[in-house]
Every structure is written in structure tokens, then in C-alpha cells.
Image (tube, rainbow, N blue to C red):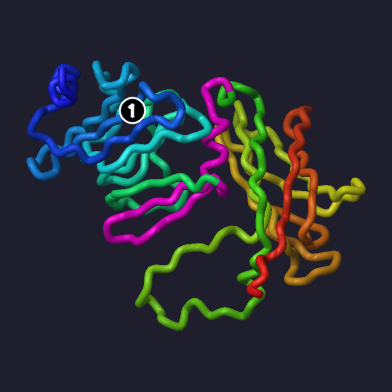
Amino acid sequence: MDLTAALEAAGAPRDRWVSRVFPSPHDANVAFVSKNGFRNDDFTPYLYRTTDGGRTWTSISGDLPRAPINVVVQDRVNSHLLIVGNDLGVFVSIDDGARWTSWKANMPTVPVHDLTIHPRESDLVIGTYGRALWVGNMQPLRELSAEILARPVHMFEIKPATRYDFGTQGMNYALGGDKYLRVPNEPEGIVVNYSLGTEGTAARITVTDSAGAVLRTVNGPTKRGLNRVVIPFQVGGGRGRGGRGASGAEGLALVPGKYTVTLDVGGQRLAKTAIVRPRPSSS
């Protein structure tokens, strides 16, 4: 049986355009195919997976919305993590395509035509039709699972952060007014992601240096599910003691180095290492 016939057997229309073929980086017998019916006024999401080298295929479109699929990728670290770009944006699945969730993270509703995962930075790079390129940290998704979401509290690994100090360089991004689309730069701080099993439990985050000295304390959000807080590199506009930053942050500036970030929630204490890197030299 050829590829077209095998896909037809799984329910894929013969006369729909193949928008992407993605071979799995984990298993040579696994691959993914998306078909696109945009040119036929058909907005059904056609997405299929093979586990036997293309002899048979299974639909994994699940609960994807009615929108043509343009691209699909499988994460090179977590084989259960799949990411789709369609005419409504980006959708992710942490369970091999059984269930899909919209990737928010400041993304507009826009057709997405290409995706790639940066091998070093764990960033998802998104190519859109009409809204340029977008980059987002997908490292927490690699850890995420139904088991983790069921836990009372979980703290994700912290991605190393670089002190570019955009906010202290005197740049004026408003010179063009509304002539150009503007989106936020990479957060100027340590980004902490965690999951809570219940809502309303106080979350306290502490940053200590290698000697154990407390440099920063933050009250984090407490909604059920995924939470995110940015601990700014600087507080109060200065480099010394004093001042308050976002989310109740107080303390000293975070210079390049290694830190311990501790999360206290409901009597549980979790800790992760955070790395602050210096701005790359231009020489």
C-alpha cells in the first residue's frame, strides 16, 4: 500500500494538499503528516501519525479546532510533546495528540506556517503569515504531564537568563509611534514557572546566592494550574538595597552568577538552580 492509500484508509481525503511531513527524531518508524483543505474551503484539521514506517496511519487531530493545519513538529526531548501551527495559531499536546491546548503566551490569533525548536535555547520559533516571527520558551512544556498537573505543587526547571539590560540602555522604542507592531522583549529577570493543584494557597519565592544570603523575596500568583512570575534583575531602578519591584519583589540586584530559587507553598518547599548570564560581548 502506498502512502496516499494508507492515509486514505485512516480517513485522509486524497485531494487535500500535504502541508507537512515530519519524521520523528526518536523513532525511525514514527512520522507525522498534516493535510490542508484551505484551497477546497475545507477547514477540517487533518493530522496523522504512523508507528510502523508508513504502512498504517492513525488520526491524532483529537479536539483541534476547525482550522487548516500548516505544520506539525515533535519535540526532540519529550516524544509525547507535539506542536501544531494552523490558521488560528499554535496548539500543543502533551499526550501524543489525544488532547490539544491553545498556546497563548501573548500570541495573536494569526495563521502559523512554520515552527522549529531551537536545539540550544529550548525556544519555540514561530513563523506567521502577517505577524512576523515569534519566539517563546517551551522548556516547561517538556516537563509537563497529567501526573504533574495532579500534584499539589510542582516547580519547573529554570531556564538560564541573560542580562541584556534593555531597560537601562536609554532606547526609545516609540519613535515610530504606531507605525510598527511592538511586542515585549525577553523578560529582564529570572522566569519561574510552577503548577498548583488548588487555588489560593500562598506562594512565596526566595532567591539566595551561593553563600545562602537572601537577595530577593517575591509573592507569586496562586491560581490553580500553571503560574509564572518574573523576578527582575533590578529593583527600584537602582543597584543597591531598597525599592520594590513587580509582585512585591524586594532586595538586591541579581548580577551574573548562580542562584537558588526556593518556592514555599502550603508547607512544601521546592528549590531549583537559576543561572544569570552576562550580556554577550560585541568584540
Task: Check disc 1 and give the amino acid type.
Answer: Ala
* Residue 23 lies within the magenta run: no
Residue 92, horizontal then vertical, whole percent = 41, 35
Residue 205, horizontal then vertical, whole percent = 75, 43
Residue 19 lies in quadrant: top left
* Residue 146 lies within the magenta run: yes
Residue 255 lies in quadrant: bottom right
Residue sitting at x 73%, y 33%: 265
* Frontmost residue, 60 versus 150: 60
Is 7 rendered above or below residue 261? above
Q: Quadrant of the N terminus?
A: top left
In-image side of 207 versus 11 (left or right): right
Q: To which residue does mark 1 refer?
A: 31
Extent of the magenta region: 120-147
Residue 137, horizontal then vertical, whole percent = 53, 47
In-image side of 26 versus 243 (left or right): left
Residue 175, horizontal then vertical, whole percent = 46, 83
Is 99 rendered above or below residue 173? above
